[in-house]
Image (cartoon, grey):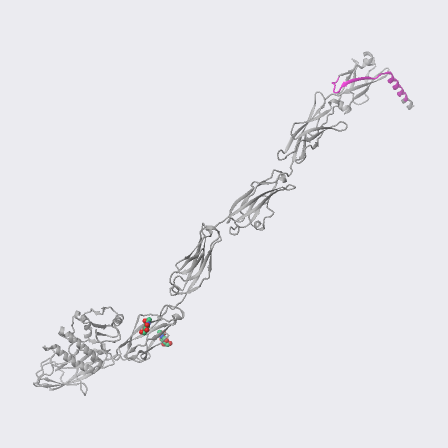
Amino acid sequence: MFELERICLLCIFLSWNLVSGQIRYTIPEESAMGSVVGNIGKDLGLTLAEISNRNLRVSAEAGKQYFRVDVGKGELVVNDRIDREELCGESASCVLPIEVIAEAPLQLHRVVVEIQDINDNAPNFETKVFVLSIAEVTASGTRFPLESAQDPDVGSNALRSYTLNSNEYFSVNTKILKGGRKLPELVMSKALDREKQETHKLVLTAVDGGSPVRTGTVQITVKVLDTNDNAPQFDKQSYDISVLENVTSGTVVIGLKATDLDEGPNGEIQYFFGDQTPETILDIFNLNSETGLMTLKRKLDYESTSLYSIDLVAKDKGSPEMRGHSSIQISVVDVNDNAPDIVLKSLSSSMPENSPVGTVVGLISARDLDSSDNGKVSLRVLGDVPFTLKQSFENHYELVTSSLLDREKHIEYKVEISATDSGSPPLTTQKSFVFSIQDVNDNPPAFTQPIYTVYLEENSAAGKIVTSVSAVDPDTGENAKVSYSILDTKVNDVPISSYVYINSDNGSIYSMHSFDYENLKAFHIQVQASDNGRPSLSSNVTVHVFIVDQNDNAPTVIYPSGPMGSLSHQKIPRSAKSGHLVTKVTAVDADSGHNAWMSYKLAEATDESLFSVNVYTGEVRTRRAVSEEDDSAQTLLVEIRDNGVPAQSATATVSILLEDGIHEPVLDLRQKDPEPIRKNGRIAFYLILSLASVSVLSLVTCLILVVKCARSARRSSTCCMGRMDSDDFRARNLQLQLNTDGPIKYVEVLGGDMLSHSQSFRSCLSPLSEFSDFTLVKPSSTLDFKDMISVLDASLPDNAWTFESQQVRQSYNNYTFPLTTV
Ligand SMILES: *[C@@H]1O[C@H](CO)[C@@H](O)[C@H](O)[C@H]1NC(C)=O
Ligand SMILES: *[C@@H]1O[C@H](CO)[C@@H](O)[C@H](O)[C@H]1NC(C)=O
């Protein structure tokens, strides 16, 4: 049944379709609402009333109601927005079928509305900015497909073509694909260079065919991708620099700079030394590959290398890498950094002190590693040493002695040599060495005293040390070893070696027997000190030995003398007055000085009131006039004492006979004698005769004295006069010797031409005058008078005595005075 109904409906529809014909309208899309599509009432043959009665309407069966029937006017009008592109998309024709229904009777009419396209859409690119990267090496003519634009319009309103803003590198080509889609292609018409222009800004325009034309644009950015097409380039073809040799390690020598036009790794530069750079250079220079800073690894040395030539390479990091080349010349500038060096060649360490001036001590040379002025060296000897440098040829010197050497002044020298170069500032080196002087036996031993004087007591035991002499020798070693010896001289014809001997090691002189002053008053010893050098040197010194008298001799009565001793028989007249000279007792003492000073004393007398003895002269005189009562035989005992300690004495006995009326046998000396010279001479002659009994030698002396006296007497009235004026005294060249405070207390008056032996006489004329208290001595004929003076001078404690030109200026009185004081 249900099946049937459906078939029935289909039949009805078919019948309706048959009834009504097809109506077709055309409207443009996007027509306004209410726009009339067509008069459907009229086209269906219906009146306005019928339309309203029969409820003519558009079937609402399907979705959107784009159209409606305007009942009042019987027209089909637009009821909704009609977008062709929405309804039909890209299809070229767009037809909307609608059904219009009329009731009573029910009638269905088919109406077709064709929607016409209008250019209501512009071409459109989906992305507004399009970025394209193109490598710069890309060949020209290469095409790059771009995004196409969309235009939903159809037909002539659809997309028609693309255009590109004008530029020299690119153009656009519209490629029509199957199905009519239009694809833009970017065509590269010229090779790109990133280094010239990195990006290209293009505007692609899509144009449709509508009227008016609608367009859509897109920004195309073309980025040129870098290609390593540029090599790094150094800023100089070659570098030339100078570096002082004394710059410290780590110092930047130069900053290398290379440029690369490429970008990125292609433009990143690394610096290297050339592949063939030798190790020696790599040891010295460092090149920071990233910064290009060239630094020193260690100090330069002009003296080893003065110029470096190095190849340089700059590489970029592109692939493949590109290289740039350069080279650098580094001149090392000499700096005075090397002190001179002193080379001591064949240097003697010592030299004998007698080497002549100019003796070559050593060869010395100077070196300096620096060049030019920095290497010019001058040498000199520092300080005050007797050495100098003689240049033999450049930088070679001989060290020679500049003066005589004396080991005794300088045992050694510290020789300092300084070498200075001519750099600025100059550098100096010093070298020193010790130079010792070898001893040469050039100094004789020197005695510690120029002269030795010894006083030796007579009678002292043999084997006593007389004195010690000492000599020093400033030389060294054997040259300074001194040995002593006594030179062979003679004393009284006896070799000195029998008197004394010397300890040859230390100079002590020993006596070999005791000395007797009365035999030997003085002698001298010549001592020689010799060193052990080869040849040996020696020096002499004189030791004066004075034998000091001791009172070992008693006075000896020489008058009166007789066979039974000193007994004299004198006769005086009874008429003799007071002061009558009876006799004169004369004695001598072999000692000297005080020991020989004698005093006379009346020890015993028959009548002490009658006679007196002069204490000094020994004259026996009457004290009073002789009277008749006096015994005719008188005996006197005269004691003669010397002044020694202890004193020694002798006695003389004088027998006197008082006679009446006899002739006076003895002359009174105080009476004026008409011929005093003859008388004096005669008395002196007697005295000489008596002295001759003591010593033959004394006789000779006295003879000479007598001659002298006789000569002088011709001018002055007395011989050996006590008070000679000093001028006269000097003229006679008499020499005085006094020792006031020394061990010997006596004065010696020396005749200049006296030749007598060392014997002293107590006043040759002593019996004649109370002023003749002189001891005349000639110490030794071998002793020079000048020596004697100097000995005395040296031994005198005060300078009361001045001897000039062997002449005594002292007044005679000055001598006599202490002598007469017994
Ligand atoms: C010298 O030597 C002797 C013996 O050895 C000695 O008795 C004497 O005192 C010495 N003399 C000196 C000055 O030393
Ligand atoms: C020392 O005396 C001796 C003998 O008189 C002599 O030969 C010698 O030359 C003298 N030496 C000196 C240095 O005077």
Image coordinates for residue 601, horizontal then vertical, percent: 17, 81
Region in magenta: 7-34
- Answer above or below: position of 367 versus 806: above
- Quarter-of-image position of residue 488: bottom left
Image coordinates for residue 302, horizontal then vertical, percent: 51, 50
- Quarter-of-image position of residue 456: bottom left
Horizontal placement of 628 versus 177: left or right?
left
Horizontal placement of 215 versus 721: left or right?
right
- As for residue 329 lying within the magenta part, the answer is no
Ligand 1 shown in quarter: bottom left
Horizontal placement of 343 versus 604: left or right?
right
Residue 159 showing in the rendered view: yes
Residue 613 showing in the rendered view: no
Q: Going by the picture, which residue comes out furthest to the front?
A: 393
Q: Going by the picture, which residue comes out furthest to the right?
A: 1
Image coordinates for residue 108, horizontal then vertical, percent: 85, 18
- Answer above or below: position of 206 versus 339: above
Between 288 and 370, the one nearer to me in the picture: 370
Q: Quadrant of the N terminus?
A: top right
- Answer above or below: position of 492 versus 728: below
- Answer above or below: position of 228 versus 804: above
Q: Quadrant of the C terminus?
A: bottom left
Task: Give the total of numbered labels.
Answer: 0
Between 235 and 77, the one nearer to me in the picture: 235
Image coordinates for residue 629, horizontal then vertical, percent: 9, 85
